[in-house]
Amino acid sequence: MKLLEERIKKDGTVRDGNVLKVDNFLNHQMDMELFQEMGKEWKKLFADKPINKILTIEASGIAIAAIAAQYFDVPVVFAKKAQSINIAGEVYQTKIESFTHKRTYDVIVSKKFIGPEDHILIIDDFLANGCALLGLIDIVEQAGATIEGIGIAIEKGFQQGGKIIRDKGYDLQSLAIIDSMNENKVVFREQ
Ligand code: 5GP
């Protein structure tokens, strides 16, 4: 998606450890017009899928998922990062290793909000090593729901997540895929 690529070039900064900072428009200050265009794009890409719910993970997935949901006309469920789990039985739970924070979170979703009848679109801001997505996929599988597709804003194509997820057969649509990046230059994959 050209608009997102141009914005990354203009406002993104590359930090040590292969971290792209997009605080200016995506995950601190948030550009709602850009989010709307991203939502429209995912709606086009998944137009033929019978999606009835969007699943994301807190915190930075929530806003993009919420805006996207307006184009799908479906509710959003977000997985919560839980400190301690003492409500076993009422929630699906999984573990996710955070790329940016280098720690492991227990993540939960209430069984009230996803079940076998659901057709899910998973949305998140970044795809790096794939841990966040694999955790969300695990939760959907525990629920017996169907994954209709996965929408990512920025995929770091030089990390392994995209290959892992596509090799599993999921319809993964990333709006911008970065093939390489350093302080001076970000190179995008032709799509
Ligand atoms: P993964 O689990 O695929 O390794 O990483 C995905 C998660 O890590 C995303 O939900 C995102 O919050 C965070 N993340 C991964 N790489 C980056 C990055 O380069 N910049 C930012 N801002 N977040 C990242």
Image (cartoon, rainbow, N blue to C red):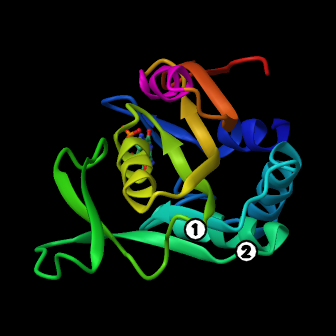
- Magenta stretch mostly in which secondary structure? helix
Question: In the figure, residue 184 lies in which quadrant?
Answer: top right
Q: Which residue is mark 2?
A: 74
Q: Earlier in the sequence, mark 2 or mark 1?
A: 1
How many marks do you count on the picture?
A: 2
Of helix, strand and loop, which one carries label 1? loop
The reply, left or right, for residue 76 in relation to residue 103 is: right
The quarter of the rendering in which ligand 1 is drawn is top left
Q: Is residue 69 above or below residue 166?
A: below
Spot occupied by residue 109 in the image (x, y as percentages of width and height): 37, 71
Please, what is the three-letter code of the amino acid marked with disc 1? Gln
Tell whether position 34 is magenta. Answer: no
**Identity of the residue drawn at 52% across and 20% down:** 167
**Identity of the residue drawn at 48% across and 78% down:** 113
Image quadrant holding the C terminus, namely top right
Image quadrant holding the N terminus, namely top right
Spot occupied by residue 107 in the image (x, y as percentages of width and height): 28, 63
Spot occupied by residue 83 in the image (x, y as percentages of width and height): 14, 72
Q: Which residue is mark 1?
A: 29
Of helix, strand and loop, which one carries label 2? loop
* Mark 2 vs mark 1: in front: 2
Q: Which residues are magenta?
A: 160-168
